[in-house]
Amino acid sequence: MRRHPVALMVIVGLVASAIGIALALVIDWFPTDAAKQAEPIDTLYDVLMIVSVPVFVLVVIVTLFAVWQFRMRPGQEKMDGPPIHGNTRLEIVWTAVPAILLVSLCSYAYTVLTDIEEKEANTLVVNVVGQQFAWRYSYPQEGGRAIETTQLVLPKDRPILFKVRALDVIHDFWVPAFRVKIDAVPGIETEVRATPTKIGRFEVVCAELCGLGHAVMRSTARVVTPAAYDSWIAEQVRGGAAGGGGAAGGDDAAGGDDAAGGDASGGDAAALGRETFVQNCGSCHTLADAGTSGAAGPDLTTALRGQSEEQIREDIVDPDARIAEGFQAGVMPGNFSETLSAEQIDGLVTYLVSVSR
Amino acid sequence: MTAKLRAPGWYRAGLFVLLGIAFSYALVGVVRTLMHYPDAWADGDAITTVALIATPLFFLVGLGCFDYWFYYASGRPTRAEDHSSHGASSWKDYFRVNTDHKVIGIQYICTSFFFMFLGGLIAMLMRAELAKPGMQFVDSSTFNGLFSVHAALLIFLFVIPVFAGIANYVLPLMIGAPDMAFPRLNALSFWMLPAAGVLLTASFFAPGGAFASGWTAYAPLSTDMPLGQVFFTVGVQFAGASSIATALNFLVTIITMRAPGMSFFRMPLLVWANFSTSLLVVIATPFIAASQFFVLLDRALGFQYFDAFVGSGKNGSVLMYQHVFWFYSHPAVYIMMLPGFGIVSEILSVKARKPIFGYRMMAFSLLAIVALGFTVWAHHMFVSGMQSWIRVPMMITTAIIAVPTGIKIFSWLATLWKGVLHLDTPMLFALGFLTTFTLGGISGVMLSMIPFDIYVSDTYFIVAHIHYVLFGGSLFTIFAGIYYWFPKMTGRMYDETLGKVHFWMTFVFFNVTFGPMHLLGLDGMPRRVADYAEQYATLNLFVTIASFALGLSMLVFLYNMVASWRGGPRAAANPWRSLTLEWQVSSPPPIFNFDAVPTVVGGPYEYGVPGAVHGIFQSPTEAKPTHAGSVATSPTRE
């Protein structure tokens, strides 16, 4: 081997590439996949890694090899290398081969793109509206009013077309388990398609910086059996808002998504409550004591007067249970029991009770 | 005292800053009174907005950037041989308006490194917050401000200007010119920079906090932001104007001031790289100026370019902002990379003792990147909701731009082949660049593939990619260049051992800081969030610890630079046995660079060619070719 350093380089390169590709392919680097769109995208990643790893290894191996073989040794301080100015054939090869490779990759990526964005029969349309800092959904009903809700419930194995809008700034509707995302853009309606394939709860994330509450602009997509979906729809049509908000929170522990929680130790509950209010509620609610001036929801400086502690707590975790006059059900996110920690909600209640006196 | 206030300098600049604030106050008050606005004299937002524009201009006038032009415009005779503002004899000369390109180069480099350390400290604060899920040190308003200011400072106040600084120092020397084509414009370009930096940094003190809409400042978030946003909007205008003026200066200098015999294809590749970069700057930078003017007009005067709220009956176009913004900001990536390509070409050829492989293709690939660089901007917008067909051509051009980039990487590798590699600090940084930048380039090709981009855009994969390109790419070349030209700029040698320690610490901790971010992105962690889910906690803690070590490695660099500049051993004129012209004069060079105009008789990289010379300092008829790598031939200094 010492006599054939280039052969050694080729062998080391092949081994390193094989290890790199194996690491990329064998370990599952992605979160759960829960939509038809996930598989072609994950496969595209695999193909890209199979092509990329050898290119990277080539550059690193040649660099290391040059350092090993051609480094200046004692006595060579005044020596120069051979005056090689170029090699036309080599230069054509390393122009043409990458070009062909890249165009092939583009063609493949294009087929994946048409695959994941294919229009399908029996597509369910769900309208998504982003606003600072919550998602709302509406399900158009034939011959009736659309169901307005803060819950995203989807039937398994049915193609969904999300029609996405924004009320204030740009947001981005992203379900990592579905792999697809699209910006919610003020003034236009954007679209993204996904076909859920797994029953369960999947996180909805805002992926475009939208202001102070960007990190907590989360919601949950619940994928259920078609039958369960139908009964949920029927229930929504029948019961309207009454049963809506409450069901979302109770049954699942908030999992990994306990938002701005965690670090409640130290400060007293009301201070935490005030901070939580400013970060999570102030964009929609005016409250003189907290210095906020949102106008989407009732003005709490006056609306809180005479409310009991229980009522305030219910208004936070189940906002649609009682609606103030002149305001609509389904606007306030119904998932604060998921996105806020228990201490934050307790603090919020303590704080709001204290300012309502 | 009155004499001090009348003469150009810091006293007059201070006075003019006060005048600028007074002017802004009066202008706003008078205009609002005439318009019958309520509270005509007490609108803080309006006064601040006008003051942010006017005060830096007053400062520049006060400091003396415009003195000669005023003198000339008033009809007095020109002073053709007036060199009173040229060159530096004490450290104080670096703090005034100076027309010497060497002084300006140092001014640029020191200023931009100051902002690099500031931006780096801000990054440390961010990583501290991100060490654990939940909120620990800062609230989300501050956090959003931190990452916005971090990016804005490092892009507009570090990477772009530090390359302008290095080229300012080196480029006129390389082409055999006594100075830049427009020395006074050069001085003005520099002094706009600290003004811009102060604006961006001072935004932390604005009511409502620093601008917190990212360095991308997407409308309508940016038009909605508190006052801090205006500091960005206006600060970028000054940084951009500085950048454009310098680029024009480089273009004219390169085209008109090359030494006799220096044809375009005898120029060192650093000169080619800055020629290409300057083309990009002159064409693209006005677009970011426009995008920020849109935001300013929307905010300050209610133009409603981006007002498109549902039901409001306003039909502004939110996507237009992104198109205009990225039409600059994608080429900006090349503005931040091509000069680095030039630096690496210089160093690899000299340190491998071989001619650069495929010189002409190296030059042409730079121009190919310039041309292609303008056709890829919408790959930043694959999930923006723009017309979906635009994505496909943008994917193809984005992938294809890897071809000229690949040509450069393969040619550098071929340059190493069979050379005699001097593995000192500049060379280590250049070799480190080759590997880290290749990784950044490959993740770039992956991101050009639309379906994959749809998944990872706005995740940590993007954060990893951009840092592999701008840190592993640009910053590594900047360090390589600073070490390489340190003897020329300061006349002293840096400490080689500390340099190597700096390289290995930077290289290792850079990779362990930013490598894992790819995995966080693949696993679905969104970027620009202060708080994240529990599943990402382990890797984030790891990244945070690594980033602190990376931060520490910068202190090694700082110490090496300061200590070596003060007391390093004297540097020879040509310690690297390089052929290019800047090494044929003393270190540091004479005040007007060349005591005799050099004549260029051959290519810049003819290492290994017996008897090859690049430039000679006698007239061509009496010149005898000297052996490559022989001692400097500057007639007066040796």
Image (cartoon, coloured by chain):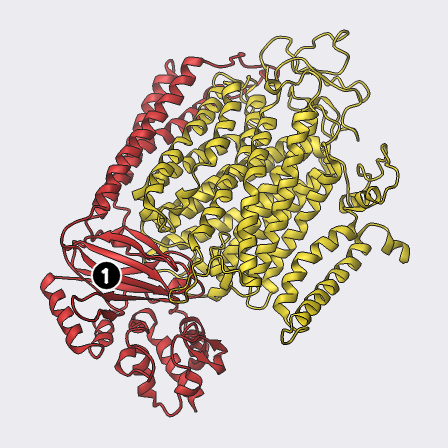
Disc 1 chain ID: A
Q: What residue is pinned by disc 1?
A: A126
Kind of element beneath mark 1:
strand
Colour chain A is painted in: red
Residue A283 position in % (x across, y down): 43, 72
Crowdedness near tag 1: few (<14), some (14–19) or many (≥20) residues, C-alpha within 10 Å: some
Q: Report the side of A63 relative to B114 (left or right).
A: left
Residue A19 position in % (x across, y down): 29, 34
Residue at image location 32% in from the left, 27% down from the top: A101
Residue at image location 88% in from the left, 41% down from the top: B76
* Image: B85 above or below B543: above
Instruction: Out of B451 and A258, give the one closest to the viewer.
Output: B451
Residue B531 position in % (x across, y down): 40, 62
* Image: A292 above or below B337: below
The C terminus of chain A: image quadrant: bottom left
Count how many numbered circles sit on residues in the image: 1
Colour chain B is painted in: yellow
